[in-house]
Image: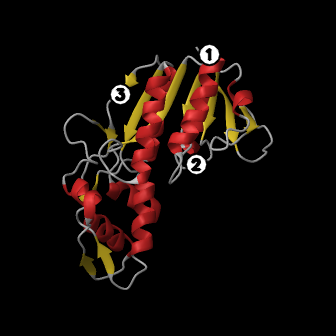
């Protein structure tokens, strides 16, 4: 059965993959945006701001399913609470949320906000599905590109990532949105764990550059958490197929 789905974050990295997949599945999309946009085939744009709590009631009116992808470096918990409050009042039947592996174990603001958002969803009483994913290949590329601009590249090897392709995350989210509320489902992670040095070297090799790497120690509670690998899931995650090397070859030729 197809319907109109409210999508937040539809213009971001993940949303740009989710949007066409929802349309291909026969859904209409109501896309919440902070700026005015003209409607396109299958997509109705509504203006609102989740952090400020503006325009949300109109966005959720008549909606059965919400796919909540919008996020940023901070404030995800506040934005999600605002959306959840309006969704509950509107009688939304399925709230789908993308979170991050390590939300409950990495003592950094972004992860803490994600955990706060998860708790707001769970405690709301709304039927929900939460998918935690690893860092996207897209983020890994932006990170190593920025680092590789330095003449000597810092390499905090306490940080290990299990990067996943955002297109595979998008496909999984659409599959979940098409199904019944499932609660907290299995994490989705990439097929390989890399140290930061390995990610950087892979990028440098792909672009034909050389840079000396300087190993550095990540201090504090965050460093301890990363050294323990709590942002990884090596036991019970659903493992995606595309590797970091596949992504680099596709993006950089």
x then y, percent, for residue 205: 32, 72
Does the CB distance between marks 2 and 3 fall below 8 Å? no
Label 3, on which residue? 185
Q: Specify whether residue 240 is in view.
A: no
Crowd class of label 3 (few under 14; some 14 to 19; many from 20; radius 10 Å): some
Secondary element at image label 2: loop
Of the two numbered discs 2 and 3 on the same chain, state the one appearing first in sequence.
2
x then y, percent, for residue 182: 40, 20
x then y, percent, for residue 84: 57, 28
Q: Distance between the residues labelled 1 and 3?
A: 23 Å
Which of the 4 quarters of the picture holds residue 65? top right
Q: How far apart are marks 1 and 2 (CA)?
A: 27 Å
Q: Which of 8 and 102 is in front in this view?
A: 102
Q: How far apart are marks 2 and 3 (CA)?
A: 23 Å
Q: Quadrant of the N terminus?
A: top right
Label 2, on which residue? 12
Secondary element at image label 1: loop
Of the two numbered discs 1 and 2 on the same chain, state the one appearing first in sequence.
2
Q: Which residue is drawn at 46% across and 64% down?
A: 142
Of the two numbered discs 1 and 3 on the same chain, state the one appearing first in sequence.
1
Which of the 4 quarters of the picture holds residue 60? top right
Does the CB distance between marks 1 and 2 fall below 8 Å? no
Q: Residue at x 72, y 38 (%)?
A: 54
Q: Which of marks 1 and 2 is in front?
A: 1
Label 1, on which residue? 91
Secondary element at image label 3: loop
Q: Specify whether residue 158 is in view.
A: yes
In the picture provided, is 7 more to the left or to the right than 234? Answer: right
Q: Which residue is drawn at 64% across and 26% down?
A: 86
x then y, percent, for residue 27: 63, 24
């Amino acid at each position: 059965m197809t319907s109109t789905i409210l999508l937040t974050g539809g213009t971001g990295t993940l949303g740009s993959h989710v949007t066409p997949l929802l349309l291909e599945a026969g859904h209409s999309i109501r896309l919440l945006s902070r700026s005015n946009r003209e409607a396109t085939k299958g997509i109705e744009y509504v203006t609102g701001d989740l952090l400020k709590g503006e325009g949300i009631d109109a966005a959720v009116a008549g909606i059965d399913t919400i796919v909540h992808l919008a996020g940023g470096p901070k404030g995800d918990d506040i934005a999600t609470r605002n959306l959840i409050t309006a969704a509950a009042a509107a009688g939304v039947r399925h709230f789908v949320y993308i979170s991050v592996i390590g939300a409950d174990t990495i003592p950094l603001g972004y992860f803490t906000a994600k955990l706060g958002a998860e708790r707001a969803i769970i405690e709301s009483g709304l039927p929900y599905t939460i998918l935690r994913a690893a860092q996207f290949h897209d983020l890994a590329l932006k990170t190593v590109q920025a680092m590789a601009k330095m003449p000597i590249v810092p390499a905090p090897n306490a940080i290990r990532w299990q990067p996943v392709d955002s297109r595979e995350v998008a496909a999984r989210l659409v599959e979940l949105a098409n199904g019944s509320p499932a609660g907290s489902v299995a994490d989705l992670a990439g097929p390989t764990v890399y140290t930061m040095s390995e990610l950087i070297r892979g990028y440098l090799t792909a672009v034909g550059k050389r840079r000396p790497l300087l190993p550095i120690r990540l201090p504090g509670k965050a460093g301890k958490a990363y050294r323990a690998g709590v942002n990884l899931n090596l036991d019970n995650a659903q493992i995606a197929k595309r590797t970091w090397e596949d992504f680099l070859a596709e993006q950089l030729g």
